[in-house]
Image (tube, rainbow, N blue to C red):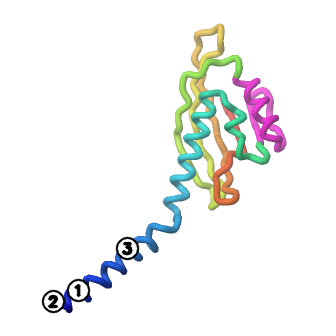
Amino acid sequence: MRRNRLTVRPLAVILPMAGILQFGAPGPGWAQAELEASVEWGRTAWLRHDFEALFASSDTVRLQLPEIGSHQAVTPAHAAQVLKEYLSPADEISFELRQIREASEDHAYAQLARRYVVRGTIDERVETVFLGFRRVAGRWRLREVRITP
């Protein structure tokens, strides 16, 4: 019986340690889950039209909007103001995630479909929105917003 206790005891120590080694350190799946959470957080902020929160973790943001064109990198406050002005005449219907794609270890894009109605009209419109993220200091940060009709 002593032999069984010796056999069981090392396994009782080794198995939890193996779990720590296997699951304790963040791996590729962790980064993907963190990216998905960042995209969902951004999607929710967009639907609330809370653009200050949307860009809160960004140091600079690039915008490309229809009829406005492309901006060089701007401050988060400036990006929030420009996006707010662009979206203000519309009522959001939906903002649905279509795809998330990692371009590299520290760059990723989310493609979303924005459905809305311009106030005073009944015509529903659709735009494709690309949110560009960059992994900085271990966190995904929104760095780019590109909208195409």
Counting other residues with Cα less than 10 Å from the Cα at mark 3, is it few (<14), some (14-19), or many (20 or more)? few
> How far separated are the C-alphas under marks 1 and 2?
7 Å
Q: Are the residues flagged by discs 1 and 2 in contact, CB closer than 8 Å?
A: yes
Image quarter where the C terminus lies is top right
| Residue designated by label 2 | 1
3 or 2: mark nearer the eye: 2
Question: What residue appears at the point 80 percent right and 33 percent down from the top-left corner?
Answer: 69
Give the Cα distance between marks 3 and 2.
24 Å
Give the camera-side residue of 98 and 15: 15
Q: Position of residue 51 (x, y in %)?
A: 70, 33
Q: Where is residue 63 in the image (x, y as percent from the top left)?
A: 76, 38
Identify the residue position indicated by label 1 in the image. 5
Q: Position of residue 37 (x, y in %)?
A: 54, 46
Q: Which residue is drawn at 83% across and 41% down?
A: 74
Picture quadrant where residue 114 is located: top right
Q: Residue at x 59, y 25 (%)?
A: 126
- Residue located beneath label 3 in the image: 16
Q: Which of marks 3 and 2 is nearer the N terminus?
A: 2
User: In this view, which residue lies farthest toward the bottom?
Assistant: 3
Between 131 and 9, the one nearer to me in the picture: 9
| Amino acid bearing label 3 | Pro
Position above or below: 44 against 6: above
- Magenta residue span: 62-87
Q: Earlier in the sequence, mark 1 or mark 3?
A: 1
**Residue flagged by tag 1: what amino acid is it?**
Arg
**Which residue ends up furthest to the top in the rendered image?**
120
